[in-house]
Amino acid sequence: MATVITEECINCGACEPECPNTAIYEGGAQWELNGATTPAIKDDLYYIVPDKCTECVGFFDQEQCAAVCPVDCCIPDPNIPETDEVLIERARVLHPDQTFGAEYPSRFRKG
Ligand code: SF4
Ligand code: SF4
């Protein structure tokens, strides 16, 4: 699942710089991918672009936005269930210059 920010967000901004995929944007800010900009998904609260979120798969074994959020409002989106395989493939597409070995970090492999 891509991670989603719920309505509990207090707009503290702590999550945005932690994302390895620049998937988090301030409310009202346009999001960007491959040089193309797209209108904001939310105007009033921080939001995550599902197509850019890998649930940190490929980089960390825990979602970094969730780890720093003071009100625990970064949660797996129940409407977008995605597998480890889908998420690492997204990481590869988002970061073509990077190599992800067989032992890439993933929250699905924890424990
Ligand atoms: Fe970014 Fe990871 Fe949060 Fe997704 S789960 S928005 S990749 S920090
Ligand atoms: Fe909102 Fe949590 Fe991000 Fe702060 S860290 S902007 S409360 S989602």
Image (spheres, helix red, strand yellow):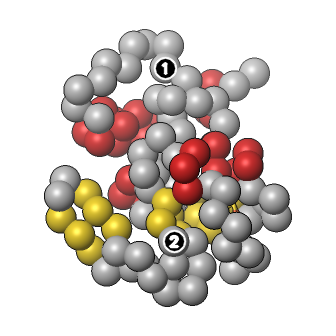
Instruction: Report the residue at 31% width, 80% height from top.
Output: 39
Per the image, label 2 sits on a secondary structure element best described as loop
Mark 1 crowdedness (10 Å alpha carbons): few <14, some 14-19, many ≥20: some
Q: Is residue 94 left or right of residue 82?
A: left
Residue 79 shows up from this direction: no
Instruction: Name the residue at the left extreme.
Output: 35
At label 1, the amino acid type is Tyr
In front of the other: 34 or 63? 34
Q: CA distance from mark 2 to mark 1?
A: 29 Å
Mark 2 crowdedness (10 Å alpha carbons): few <14, some 14-19, many ≥20: many
Q: Is the C terminus in the top left, top right, bottom left or bottom right quadrant?
A: top right
In front of the other: 38 or 61? 38
At label 2, the amino acid type is Glu
Instruction: Report the residue at 67% width, 56% height from top.
Output: 14
In front of the other: 78 or 96? 96
Image location (x, y in percent) of residue 93: 25, 39
- What numbered label is drawn on residue 77? none
Image location (x, y in percent) of residue 66: 70, 51
Residue to which mark 1 is pinned: 104
Per the image, label 1 sits on a secondary structure element best described as loop
Q: Is residue 24 left or right of residue 38?
A: right
Instruction: Report the residue at 58% width, 45% height from top.
Output: 18
Q: Is residue 44 left or right of residue 58?
A: right
- What numbered label is drawn on residue 26? 2
Image location (x, y in percent) of residue 83: 49, 42
Image location (x, y in percent) of residue 82: 48, 49
* Vertical arrangement, residue 8 with respect to residue 85, above or below: below
Sequence-wise first label, 2 or 1: 2
- Quarter of the figure with residue 87: top left
* Vertical arrangement, residue 22 with respect to residue 8, above or below: above
